[in-house]
Image (cartoon, rainbow, N blue to C red):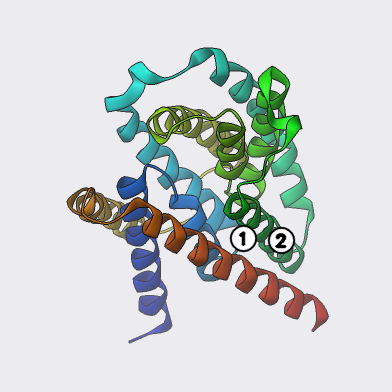
Amino acid sequence: MTDEWVGQLLLAVIVLLGSSVQWLTGMGFALVAVPALVLVLGPAEGVVLANCAAGVISVVGLTDGWRRVRLGAMVPLCVAAVCTVPVGTWVARRLSEPALMATMGVLVTAAVVLVMRGARVRALRGGGGALVAGGVGGFMNSAAGLGGPPVSLYALNADWTVREFVPNAQFYGVVVNAVSIASNGLPDLAAPVWGLAAGAMAVGALVGRALAGRVPEERVRLLVLLLALGGGLSALGKGLWELWM
């Protein structure tokens, strides 16, 4: 088996796993997939492919939950994200690949640790908190493909339930990923790779829906965070190693 086939197989597994988690819990694709996609495809292509996949999943998921979207909270979140997405793109394009890899590793690891600790942050409350969370999320989404954790922390500090959070996170995901793709451009991938990713997403959706309600949500959430933490540390380690070499 050639290195190209191995890479494509890894990509399919990563997308399938991320899609399964997203459909199982309503979130988590980027946390699971981005660190691994970055290691397989490199920072630039990995981030934009994650933006594309997460955006499609958010669109499909929102078809059932759009009535529960809190526009009063989401408008400032999304407006702030739209303003900071180009900044994330600008920063990412000016860093070398090892530096970008290390930076993404730091961002992923820090985001996971904050979410795992359930951090309560006064700056993330109210209208001002929505602007902060949306702005940080937009920057992180375009630079590192990981715009969800700041919004998760905002929802935590606003005492949203999971039922309230999921459709609003999907609405945010549609907006921020669409703007990130417009800012970063589409990944330069061959047609078979696009087909493989689309097929893996479809299979992942079937797996996630089949497991929904059968697997305790807290266990899945912990697994997602541990996988993301491991991926973030791996990306950080690889980036620092290449910088040192």
Q: Which mark is residue 106?
A: 2
- Which of the image's four quarters has the N terminus? bottom left
Note whether 244 is above or below 161 in the view shown: below
Note whether 27 is above or below 95 in the view shown: above
Q: Residue at x 55, y 39 (%)?
A: 152
- State whether residue 166 appears in this view: yes
- Circle 2 sits in a helix, a strand or a loop, which is it? helix
Note whether 243 is above or below 75 in the view shown: below
**Would you say 243 lies left or right of 62 here?**
right
Q: Position of residue 112 (x, y in %)?
A: 60, 56
**Would you say 244 lies left or right of 160 here?**
right
Question: Label 2 amino acid?
Answer: Val
User: Circle 1 sits on which residue?
Assistant: 43
- Which of the image's four quarters has the C terminus? bottom right
Q: Residue at x 49, y 66 (%)?
A: 227
Instruction: Tell which circle, 1 or 2, labels the residue nearer the N-terminal end.
Output: 1
Q: Residue at x 61, y 65 (%)?
A: 232
